[in-house]
Image: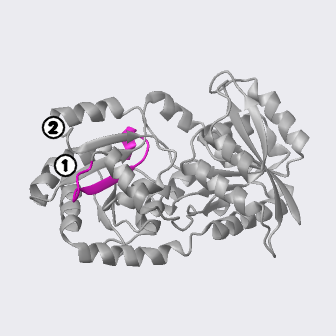
Amino acid sequence: MSTIRVLAMLEATSIVGTAKAVLEFAKEATKGYAGYPRIDLTIATFDRGEGENCVTEAIRDIGTCHEVILERWRYDTQVIPQLRSLVARRGADLIWTNSVKSHFLVWWAGLHRSRKWVAFHHAYTTTDLKTQLYNQLDRWSLRTADRVLTSAAAFVGELEGRHVRPDCICVQHMPIRPFGGVSENQKARLRWQLGLEPGTRVLLSVGRLSHEKGHADLVRALPRIRELAGDAPFRLVVVGEGPERPRIEKLCRSLCLTDIVTLAGQQSEIDPYYSIADLFVLPSHSEGCPNVLLEAMAAGVPVIAAAVGGIPEIVTHGQNAILVKKRNPEDLASAAALLLHDRELCGRLVSSARGILVTKTPEAYFKSIASIFSQACAMPAGEAAGEAA
């Protein structure tokens, strides 16, 4: 097909993770590439009365067609007729979903029977019983998609366990743009805002404050890091917001760490934080292909990460990152102390990490996704996963 009309469903209200990747795809779709189909893209977002947010602003700035689905709560049945009408009005050849809810809505509305469907699985969170129940919906919906993308090979077995056909599964890592750079004035201003004394090293962690991100493990590692670091002053700066914040704050108080931990909250501009970081720490219990890992490497920050999910597919221990066991504060402390003392090792990790990024450009991401869309649209009706299931 020379042109594929794609409806991408996006639930995010901040430009992180899934939203960032879809927006990168949208930017590349405006360019057009020889040998690849033209993508006529529409992005649909959900609105419960909040109105404009940074995601909808970004869609408008790119110039991508934007549609809004109004809903009263998470699984509002009135969404179904709106979604059917939207698909018909836009003449969508293919629907691209990026979350459990959107997967389920496409299946529930029966749209997989009349349109090609590519679902992107970005890993599950298990923060509470309700979320776990929502995750189970994929058992019904994903097996009916024409293609199921996943951000890590580590999740392929999980998808197969949910009756997704192996020949329908494609592993797709996230894209990353080159680091834009931050002025010395911006760096100095941020350090002043954070109350950092000259010479204080910065351990940075970026991510939603939820249990599976492992921030509590990192906080528990700090007393040992302080012991191993000796006289070298440091501060842990955590960027992100979420339900774990009260627990993390309580843990910091109980361990008498409030003087060396800053919870910076959600930030619309993250580059300045990478620019002042001496180490980046990702202590997650589960991950796919984390954007923050790629961002840290693009910014030239040495990385410590838990060896979970797709992380070992991206980086190699001792070569371009230091990998540690998950839920292991002692491992985190030893790795952090090592890099705080060994600047030569930090330099080698950063230099080696640059080689990874050249294969994960937004252009490469667009071409890969566009090829998958083209393959799905070329599938005869009788070969769709939904009819085989």
Q: Residues within 10 Å of mark 1 (few under 14, many from 20)?
A: many
Q: Position of residue 348 (x, y in %)?
A: 32, 78
Q: Position of residue 321 (x, y in %)?
A: 34, 69
Q: Which residue is drawn at 32% across and 48% down?
A: 192
Residue linked to disc 1: 222
Decide whether residue 6 is among the magenta residues.
no
Residue 261 seen: yes
Please state if 206 lies on the left or on the right of 6 as rendered.
Answer: left
Of 49 and 308, which appears nearest the observer?
49
Of 95 and 227, which appears nearest the observer?
227
In the picture shown, does residue 187 fall above or below 299?
above
Rendered image: mark on residue 255: 2
Q: What residue type is labelled 2?
A: Leu
- Give the magenta part as a residue range: 196-214
Q: Is mark 1 on a helix, strand or loop?
A: helix
Q: Residue at x 77, y 51 (%)?
A: 63
In the picture shown, does residue 107 fall above or below 362?
above
Q: What residue type is labelled 1?
A: Leu
Q: In which quarter of the image is the N terminus?
A: bottom right
Q: Looking at the image, is mark 1 or mark 2 earlier in the sequence?
A: 1
Q: Which residue is drawn at 83% across and 48% down?
A: 115
Rendered image: mark on residue 124: none
In contact (CB < 8 Å): disc 1 and disc 2: yes
Residue 284 seen: no
Please state if 311 lies on the left or on the right of 345 as rendered.
Answer: right
